[in-house]
Amino acid sequence: MYVCVCKAVSDTKIRRLVKDGATTLRELSRETGLGTCCGKCVPQARETLSQSLAAQ
Ligand code: FES
C-alpha cells in the first residue's frame, strides 16, 4: 500500500528503510522524497515509522 502517493513510497519500503537503520521521518524523506510534495502522507508515514521502530 502506498503511504506517499506523490513519491510512490509504500509501507513496505518504509519498513525496509527502518530495518536498514532509518529512525526519523527526516531520514525517510531524504532517502525517498516522502512528504516533500503535498505533505498529506506525513501523519500516515509517522505512524508507519513508529510501528516499524516498535516492531524491531
Ligand atoms: Fe506524500 Fe504527497 S503523498 S508528498
Image (spheres, helix red, strand yellow):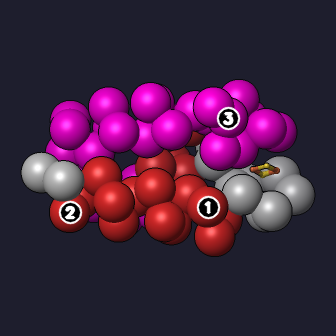
* Residue 6 image position (x, y, % from top left): 82, 39
Residue reaching furthest to the right: 38
Earlier sequence position, callout 1 versus callout 3: 3
Q: Is residue 21 magenta?
A: yes
* Residue 56 image position (x, y, % from top left): 12, 51
**Pick the front one: 29 or 51:** 51
Rendered position, 16 above or below 50: above
Q: Is mark 3 within 8 Å of ligand 1?
A: yes
- Location of residue 45 (image quadrant): bottom right
- Location of residue 27 (image quadrant): bottom left
Report the residue at 50% width, 66% height from top: 46
Q: Which residue is mark 2?
A: 54
* Residue 51 image position (x, y, % from top left): 33, 60
Q: Which residue is mark 1?
A: 44
Disc 2 on helix, strand or loop? Answer: helix
Q: Write the start and end of the magenta stretch as one range.
A: 1-27
Report the residue at 80% width, 62% height from top: 40
Q: Which residue is mark 3?
A: 2
**How many residues crowd mark 2 within 10 Å: few (<14), some (14–19), many (20+)?**
few
Say if mark 3 contacts mark 2, CB within 8 Å: no
Q: On the picture, is 48 further left or further right than 22?
A: right
Q: Is residue 56 magenta?
A: no
Report the residue at 79% width, 63% height from top: 39
